[in-house]
Amino acid sequence: MELTATSPRPPVIRQFAAAWGFVRRWPVIPIAVIAVLIILGIFGPQIAPHDAVLSDARSRHVPPVGIETCLGAKCKTGSWKNPLGTDHVGRDVLSRIIVGSRISLIVATISLVVGLIVGTSVGMISGYIGGVFDEIVTRIVDIWLALPFLMVALLAVLIFGQSLGVVFVLLAVLSWVGFVRIVRAQTLQLKEMDYVALAKIAGAPPERIIIRHVLPGVINSAIVVATLNVGNLILAEATLSFLGAGIPPPTPAWGVLISEGRQYVSTAWWQTAFPGVGIFMVVMSLNFLGDWARDRFDPRLRQLIE
Amino acid sequence: MQRFLLRRALFIVVSLLGATIVIFSMTRLAHDPRELFVPDTGYGMSEEQWEALGDKMGFNKPIPVQYLLWVGNLLQGDFGTSIHQELEVRDIIFSKMGATIQLAIGGWMFAILIGVPLGVAAASSRGTIWDYVSRGFALFGQALPQFWTGIMAILIFAVLLQWLPAGTRGDDESFNIKYYILPSIVLGWPAAAGIMRLTRSAMLEVLDSEFVKLARAKGVGRFKVIWKHALRNAMIPPLTSALLLMAGYLNGALVVETVFSWPGIGWIALNKAVYDNDFPLLQGTVFTFILFYLLFALIADILYAVIDPRIRYS
């Protein structure tokens, strides 16, 4: 009889273990969710099974597939025609979520990029130059953090009116502060490095030192901060839209969907529940990705953002 | 310590000044501030009324003078008169402040009572089910939109299970804990998530330190080491930042009060000020929120300096 120390694992289990290890090491699921979001954002209107804006009074509040609801003697059963049901004027909830992803995606991305560029430049300049300019920037950041964002946003909407432009500006000014603090702190460290001093001795002007020698050192952190910030921006946009101060209707932004469904929640929960699940999945994936990026690319940041 | 307090007081003054400049320039940037008093859908004003309003509000004076007059009124506690309710803005805010403070305390208690123990549990049994439960709790708290959590909580616990009332306690002043449970949890969840993460990382650091190892080596029980020796030293960052977190979650109070029809400052700001175009009222609520925040920040700073003298002068 042959003796074997350990019987070899069956290949199926080995493959499964390898796959599990891969999923644990790489943020596969968050990336998949975000990839789906991007595809939906670009091709949303083509993918959506129904028109997202056109109403159909005959099919109001049809429940999601496989669920039956009765109001009095009238019963409705959900079918695959509207997998997530319909809303109070008979629009397909799934289609509205898909089409709504576009606006959330655009708003979050543009305001993030603006915040990234402005915040990183201001942070680098402020940290490198120092002096009065640095003092002023730090004060402005402190004051800005003391302002209650939603209140100021409501004030802005009351004064300037409800429009897409106001939302962009508000979210951009919400996001730039995060970049300034981190980038400035790192610039202060980089400034003391020998290679920066050598560049200075070689006669490089400040703008060249900032672009060629400081920027490469802070860009990693800036991108990590960006990933950690997108989720918050999407949440902020949804909150503004929910309060009626964000994206103006009839654009189906996610926050708008939830605020529309709110008054029907006891009879038609699906109209409110599914958009919220959408927001949650996207924000959760982005937060996961942000944490992962921080730990992988910039573990020092852990002390600054936790 | 005195120098530190002085610096913090100066910071508050500068912040308030900055806030007034931001708000004042916003109102003047848009268009004639008188237009804020006349909604597009209204009946409009006659020429004489328009001029009279301008005289009354001082819009005919130069801009710097207007600013100084306005700040002077604010300093005297005069936020102006609400347009729709014909009441002093100050009185409206005072009458609703209690409800907001109660809600904030409820949320804060939830955040600490849940956040700290979960953080300790996650750190002391790293990699076990407790760790994952706590981190899941934090992830959910930071990714769920509060307004949605609130609506779902009402649907599940008030409409379907009928355990708790569906929201508002109204202007009823009598205390009934049932009305506070759902709003406090919804308000406190994100804060609890933040506190849990802070406690967890602080505990991990302390548990790795020499004096904890010494205590273990001396034969002190695991329970006692974690909850007495380690927690005491790990509590500083979460407790002080809890105040700051809570100040930040005043934003959440606006949302939670809206969802639960809670008659506080946030609800007033949205339903009475924004939807009715009541500009002086909104300005007053914004200021109250800023004052709250700065007050919380000051208390947090002082606490921090008292508990941990090392950071006082940094």
Image (tube, coloured by chain):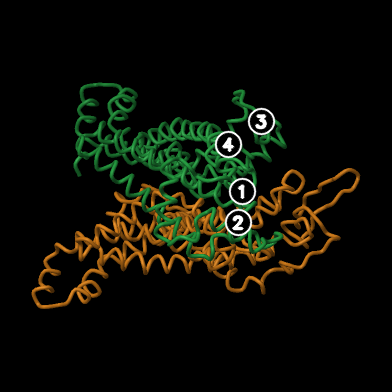
Which residue is painted at 58% across and 56% down in the image? B53
Q: Nearer the viewer, residue B65 or B94?
A: B65
Q: Residues within 10 Å of mark 2 (few under 14, many from 20)?
A: some
Q: Do labels 3 and 2 share a chain?
A: yes
| Disc 4 to disc 1, C-alpha distance | 30 Å
Q: Name the residue under label 1.
A: B83
Farthest-out residue, right: A73
Task: Note whether A219 is above or below B4 in the view shown.
Answer: below
The answer to which image quadrant residue A158 occupies is bottom right
Q: Which badge, 3 or 2, comes first in the chain's sequence?
A: 2
* Numbered label attached to residue B183: 4
Indicate which label's residue lies in the foreground, 3 or 1. Answer: 1
Q: Colour of chain B?
A: green
Query: In the rendered structure, which amino acid carries the disc numbered 1?
Result: Ile
Inspect the image, locate mark 3, and give the three-letter code of the amino acid beneath it: Leu
Provide the chain ID for the residue under circle 4. B
Residue position for label 2 = B37
Who comes first in sequence, dot 3 or dot 4?
3
* Residue type, numbered disc 4: Pro
Q: CA–CA distance between discs 3 and 1?
A: 36 Å
